[in-house]
Image (spheres, rainbow, N blue to C red):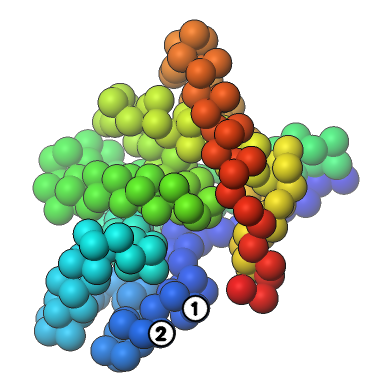
Amino acid sequence: MTTMKTTHRLLYTLLLATLGCASAHAAGLELSDCDILIGKKSNAAYKDWLKDNQKEADAGDRDAIRLRAIEAHNRLACYEEKLTGDNGWGMTMTSSDGSSETRQPPGIANIRKQPAAWRTLNQAVKYGHQAGAFDVGLKGASAELVVRYAAELPQQLEAAYEDAAAVYEYDCVLKRQFGRRDRNAGCASGRAARARLIPMVAAERRQALDASARLWAEQLPAVPKNQ
């Protein structure tokens, strides 16, 4: 039997509802509004929030670090929809034997020729990787972006492999729950991202990266669904 799960590029509306209450929601912001995120609609409150959240993230506040990654990821999704005309739906198919295949919508061709989108891609990968130090979902999202834009991000391949391997260890091997996140979908996505990155990373490097990923997964505790 095969199950299918569809996901949208704007992955983090639910997380925004739980994380952003003290800052984004206080400013009356909707951080999945593409018109605001890519500047088609001016919003002074958004710009003020962005500046304040950046300061808090730089100071080490974990919620701010998460929100910085989420905002960049959603902003990239908006550019992708604008420039490709694709509505952003992806699909993960999982068979009863545990094997899976993830099909993602196309990225932006020649993204380096789109300065705003290129800058946003690099921010989304960087900030997602940073937040991934303590958030398995954002770790996986960063790795998946590198997979989709691998030809444009060769220097990020090893870090992305380690991130994908860590998600695989956490979700598939240890089977730990991380809040309201869908662990089965995370496992399928992490396994698929790791598989796609294997031929892009030298075997001698993968051994060390796998060990580091395993250690990270073992040290990150599970989070109950109600948190």
- Residue at 48% across, 31% down: 162
* Residue 42 visible in rendering: yes
The image position of residue 161, as x and y in percent, is 47, 29
Using residue 30 as the reference point, say whether residue 203 is left or right of it. right
Which residue is at the front of the view, 73 or 41? 73
Q: Amino acid at mark 1?
A: Thr
The image position of residue 223, as x and y in percent, is 64, 63
Which residue is at the front of the view, 61 or 142? 61
Using residue 141 as the reference point, say whether residue 95 is left or right of it. right
Vertical order, 34 against 168 (above or below): below
Which residue is at the front of the view, 45 or 131? 131
Vertical order, 145 against 49 (above or below): above
Q: Residues within 10 Å of mark 1 (few under 14, many from 20)?
A: few
The image position of residue 37, as x and y in percent, is 24, 70
Using residue 43 as the reference point, say whether residue 2 is left or right of it. right
Q: Which residue is mark 1?
A: 18
Q: Secondary structure at mark 2?
A: helix
Vertical order, 209 against 120 (above or below): above
Q: Which residue is mark 2?
A: 21
Which residue is at the front of the view, 227 or 15? 227
Q: Amino acid at mark 2?
A: Cys
Q: Quadrant location of the C terminus?
A: bottom right
Q: Marks 1 and 2, Cα distance to the nearest angstrom?
A: 6 Å
Using residue 31 as the reference point, say whether residue 205 is left or right of it. right
- Residue at 45% across, 40% down: 143
Q: Tell me the quarter of the picture where residue 10 sits.
A: bottom left
- Residue at 45% across, 59% down: 9
